[in-house]
Amino acid sequence: MVTARLATRAVDLCTMLILARLLSPLDFGLIAIAMTLITLLEAALELPLSQALVQLPRIEPHHFHTAFTIGLLRGVALCVIAMSLALPFDRWYGHPELTPLIQALSLAPASRGLQNPRLAEYAKELNFKYEFYLEISGKALAFLAGSLTAYFLHTYWAIALCTIVAPASTTLMGYIILPYRPRLSLRDWRLFSDFLGWFSLSQIIMAVNFQSDQLLLGKLLPPAKLGLFSTANSLTYIPLTALFGPVLRPLLSAFTVRRDDIARLGQSYQHAASGIVSIGLPFLVGQVIIAQPLIMVLLGPKWLSAASLFEWLSISLIPYLFGLLLTPLSMALGQTHEIATRNMLQIMVKLPLVIIGAINYGFAGVIVARLISESVTALYCMLSIRKLCGLSLTRQFTVNLRAIMSCVAMLIVVLSLDRTMYFPLSPSWQLLRLTLLIGSGVISYAGCLLLSWRLAGYPEGLEAFAVRLLWRRSLAKRRIA
């Protein structure tokens, strides 16, 4: 799953780079405004059918039929609502291009909800090979469609086409790879209702929370400036979603297996959470350091003003790492109301701050609102985890001390190196600067992390896992030789 998500995010990144070179921030801004409504509708009608199927003790064919029927009804409802709201939405923002965009973009979440329910059968067994093939194929087709459209037509419809083709092709190929003949049935809808109720509420709240800043900025700022913000925001999330998005579903399955043994569940959670921070924290801190050369190399000079946004957006996401795994943990224990409560708290903190910040301070106010709300949410997540599996706040925090100290060391080394060198703003020189900064950051972080792990007495965790993996591969090569 991690390999699949890394590969698909690499394709997403390549797509973004090509589209950013061929299109303008204005084009990205129009898509960002249209996608705010689509994202909100998708969340409001979110039905995590696959997760609900995974939780069942045994999955029968009639469960698949019910899941498919619910997904079909949800897709039809989403398209109808999106088409109804498209015209008033474009009048509110004053951009007539939004009506056809919204109507077309509604096909993406509708098709995503119609994926083959048989995939849950394999997910329950921690077998994700089919999802790997489907994700890679769908993203590759979207890349080709969007890139060719942007090259020949130079229109924002290239971005819309990418958004639609990926889920539509993935869903279609899912029924080809895993033969399944759907039947309309609502026989088992009660098995999904309780699970979906709390989860759907939490998804609505999370979507409003996530899209509130773009909704406001889209009204207050020109689309070109919103395009800078949305592109920097998307670039910020790529490493996190690539690395940790696919981990959540296997962890749901793993936590579900251990939910009757709270001691083992707590231990499993702590190992997974420390791994999340040990990998995610250096990525976010590193993004802050390399923002300017990264934007220059990837997107080009016309996007350089997005570099400062990229820096601060990366900083605002750091608290997010410390509560990320509450979702699979609470779902495994059947306590999905914890997710809804977390999202409700976050929006209660963030929404008023975003409104005040966006109106008075623009981008800076939105980013500060994000940082405050993410910090409060992370604290709530840690308190919920203490209640669910008995891990104290001290234990949750101290397990990440090695990663935090290693990031501080990396920050000192890389900033010191960057300040001793001067590079012109040409793309080739900035590429050299980027390479040197990334290389020095990886070496300093990994070295400090391993040293602190050794001084701590070789405890279990990401470091132990990585060392064992490298040792096994080394032994395997020696045997082959």
Image (cartoon, helix red, strand yellow):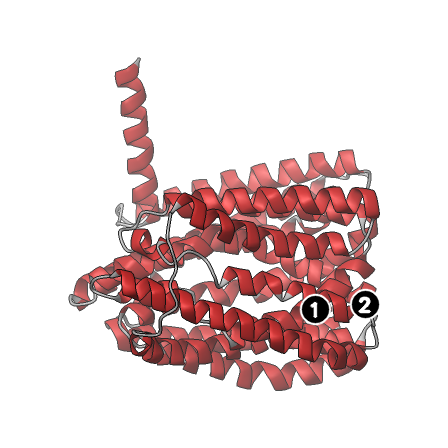
Judging depth in this view, the residue of 185 and 328 nearest the camera is 185
Judging from the image, what secondary structure is the residue with disc 1 in?
helix
Which dot marks residue 118?
none
Q: Does residue 349 appear to the left or right of 176 in the view shown? A: right
Instruction: Let me know if residue 210 appears in the view.
Output: no
Name the residue rendered at 61%, 83% in the picture: 351
Q: Looking at the picture, which amino acid does disc 2 mark?
A: Glu
Q: In the rendered image of this protein, does residue 473 appear above or below residue 180?
A: above
Q: Quadrant of residue 226?
A: bottom right
- The residue that mark 2 highlights is 97
Looking at this view, is 35 or 410 the one in front? 35
Amino acid type, residue under disc 1 in the picture? Ile
The tally of labels here is 2
Q: Position of residue 390 (x, y in %)?
A: 24, 73
* Residue ID at (71%, 36%): 431
The disc label shown at residue 102, or none: 1
Query: Can residue 63 be seen in the rendering of this structure?
Result: yes
Where is residue 383 drawn, in percent x and y?
A: 35, 77
Query: Residue placed at 75% from the left, 59% from the top?
Result: 28
44 sits left or right of 91 in the view: left
